[in-house]
Amino acid sequence: MSNSAASGGCDYTLTEQGIHQFIFREATKEAIDDFFHKLEAVFVATSGVDTNRYILDITQSGERNVSLVTNVQRFRRLETLFPNRPRGRTAILHRPGLAYTLIDSFIRALAPSRDITRFFPVDERDEAIAWLLSESR
């Protein structure tokens, strides 16, 4: 997989820190399909890695919000295809003012123990990157 791939509503870049960055440009089913296609390629390319770090920016998708419910459902299906994938640490950048504290608690309760997801307002990108590179929960 290349270090940068744009198309289909979700851009992918592998940052200098080794973080897999996904930026949703649209809040459409096609953008979610594109994201999961690229995520599968990351899983294949990193099969021997212990932990993958991801940053998902859902703030650039226009007026509509990216469906987190659809993403969780799709990820559950993807888990069955890649049962031995690397652990994941994911920071999701969101717009301020949305009820992501509740969603964050919900995701923590439902996520597999080997995956950790946290939500950060988009203006806390530096804090999100610091958290991704740390080993704290």
Image (cartoon, grey):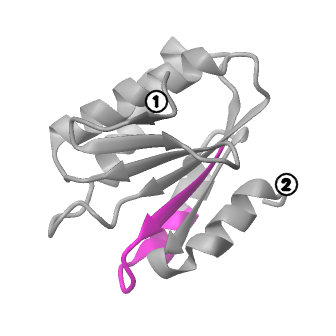
Q: Which residue carries the number 2 mark?
A: 135
**Disc 1 to disc 2, how far (Cα)?**
22 Å
Left or right side of 50 for 125: left
Element type where label 1 sits in the image: helix
Q: Which residue carries the number 1 mark?
A: 39
Residue 91 in the magenta stretch? The answer is yes
Image position of 112 with respect to 23: above or below: above
Camera-side residue of 46 and 99:
46
User: Quarter-wise, where is residue 57 in the image?
Assistant: bottom left
Left or right side of 84 for 66: left
**Mark 2 Cα shell of 10 Å, populated few (<14), some (14-19), many (≥20):** few
Residue 107 in the magenta stretch? The answer is no
Q: Amino acid at mark 2?
A: Glu
Of mark 1 and mark 2, the one earlier in the sequence is 1
Q: Amino acid at mark 1?
A: Leu
The magenta stretch is: 89-105
Mark sitting on residue 51: none
Left or right side of 13 for 45: right
Residue drawn at point x = 35 percent, y = 36 percent = 35
